[in-house]
Amino acid sequence: MPENTEMSNLPVAVIGAGPVGLAAAAELLERGLTPLIFESGDTPAAAVASWGHIRLFSPWQYDVDAAARRLLASTGWQEPDAETLPTGAELHEQYLSPLAAVPAIADALHTSTRVLAVSRGGLDKTRTSGRDTTPFLIRVQDADGAVTDFRARAVIDASGTWNTPNPLGQAGLAAVGEAEASAAGVITGPLPDVLGRDRNRFAGKHILVVGAGHSAANTLLSLGELAEQEPGTRISWVIRSASANGVYGGGDLDGLPARGALGSRLRTLVQDGRIELHTSFTITGFKTADTLAVTGSTPAGEKQLDVDLLVPATGFRPNLDLLRELRLDLDPVVEAPRELGPLIDPELHSCGTVAPHGAKLLSHPDKDFYIVGMKSYGRAPTFLMATGYEQVRSIAAALAGDQQAADDVQLVLPETGVCSTDLGGSCDAPADGPVEASCCVTAPAPAAGEAASPAARPNRNRRRRRAVPRMRTRRQKRKRHPRAAARPNRSSSASPPAWNTAAPQHRGPDARRTVAGRRRPGDRRRAGRSRCRLLLEPVAAGRGLRQVRAGAILCHPRCQSGDRRGVAALLEQPGAVFPGCLQFPARLPHARLGGRGQPLGRPRCAVSAHL
């Protein structure tokens, strides 16, 4: 393409033909712009097809882009039921493949084409003069090895993170011998289809799963089912933390039944000895011979595990190498666009608590270059496809010159607890698992007469101004809280009260109580001036909280919003955080989050309760 081609006549390059990349193409077409799409796989959305056996946590209503829906409507496409949770295969076959086959998109789509680099035509990273008016140069390589340069007026990078999993070693680095083990085929790809196409590879083998996310849990449950059918199959599980309670969840006390059921099934397999769990295990090296020797450091010293196959489930990170000649402004923690980084910190936010964002937050110093989709979240694992769809809608509007529409970002997401996924694209659950609720989908409405789950309540206090507490004397405090005198002295050496005692119940219309029972009907929210309160009754639809068991995790959306309000997790290991959730060890010392006393973990909001 000639160097002097007018910028306005050039296409908009879209890197990646996954859900968000194809949505970007649909949004551009609706705005009268021409997309130019590059997909490294041999089919559109090849990454989604590779985890087709996994069921999403998001129902169809969040999985279809609005512009794509309108584009498909002209072809006679039948939209799936909005409330159904699709598998990756169903998403690919019923939505992404038909969308990619629309003539306007098919004509612009280049499959089996890998983007090698993105730069400005004739300018490297150090050149500034005329940069904003110089077309982008996209260098690609096709399946035959031929290298071609394309030019574009703008670039939307929706390439995802599926091909760049996190390394297995410590400190974010690959362990010694990890590359050789991967080349030998004894380290598998992420999310293998254990009960399907990969069954023969795993049957009768000793399998080691590394990781503590939903992907690890799903793989372990599938392996547990395989072990029942194939004698000789042995399962080991390695995590770096000292406890697996974070993976197990709250069981029947969890506000999200599907997540609770997932953790309960996994806990049972471990307790029954069908999964051998190794905690506080940090991998330091691999040796490949007849078997794979996995060396790790533990509190008891160095330990070695001999296994046949290793399944990594340690999450993903973005590949930024192809963008080295562009001027980027990235958050130093999660490697997302700088202004977006604090909004998606996985220690503070879940899928449904990230504020909607568009072209403004996703922009970089190189004008008209954007990173979208899972890659826009960097190392944060809490991305939802619906978020990506709003991103590209806003960007398409900005590129078309409609700045008002670009700035008017709106997004309705389910706000139901922590949604940490290591899928590299969307939330995951076993295809044959419970689908009535999940960490990314609102739980079913309670039956008539039942109390609503906190996970299902809207966050009405999201934009409430912070109440500034006034200073009060100790006598005023005791007068305000008559039971204060009866509370144990924090400086006392007496044993702290156990959290597994029954909580008092009230039956009136305003019968919600804080953890310590300090708020009663008619108290007019006198239980404290914290910015948000963790209310634990009821925890699940139709169930009041009568007992808090050791290790239980309880969530409430009030403590999850886009302005960095989160709740510290009180874990058995110091310093860990569960956004929006509170985990109870067997015993807790006296502490008050947001008030006097030594807080545990890293509190992000005040909880009106003495622990």
Image (cartoon, helix red, strand yellow):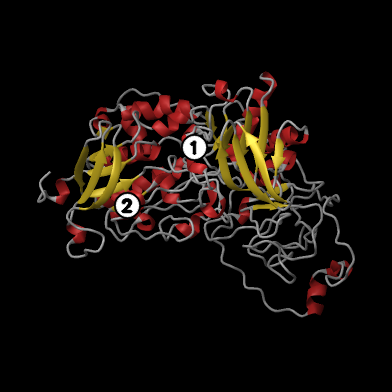
Residue at x 66%, y 19% (from the top left corner): 230
Quadrant in which the C terminus appears: bottom right
Residue 239 quadrant = top right
User: x, y (%) of residue 480?
Assistant: 79, 71
Contact, mark 1 vs mark 2 (Cβ under 8 Å):
no
Please name the residue that numbered disc 2 is placed on.
Answer: 323
User: x, y (%) of residue 63?
Assistant: 45, 35
- Depth order, front residue of 411/195: 195
Please name the residue that numbered disc 1 is placed on.
Answer: 182
Q: Earlier in the sequence, mark 1 or mark 2?
A: 1
User: x, y (%) of residue 88?
Assistant: 48, 30
Would you say residue 563 is visible in this rendering? yes
User: Does 379 sit left or right of 137 as displayed?
Assistant: right
State the mark number for residue 519: none
- The amino acid on which the numbered mark 1 sits, given as a three-letter code, is Ser
Between the residue at mark 1 and the residue at mark 2, the CA separation in whole angstroms equals 26 Å
Residue 314 quadrant = top right
Looking at the rendered structure, the secondary structure element under dot 1 is: helix
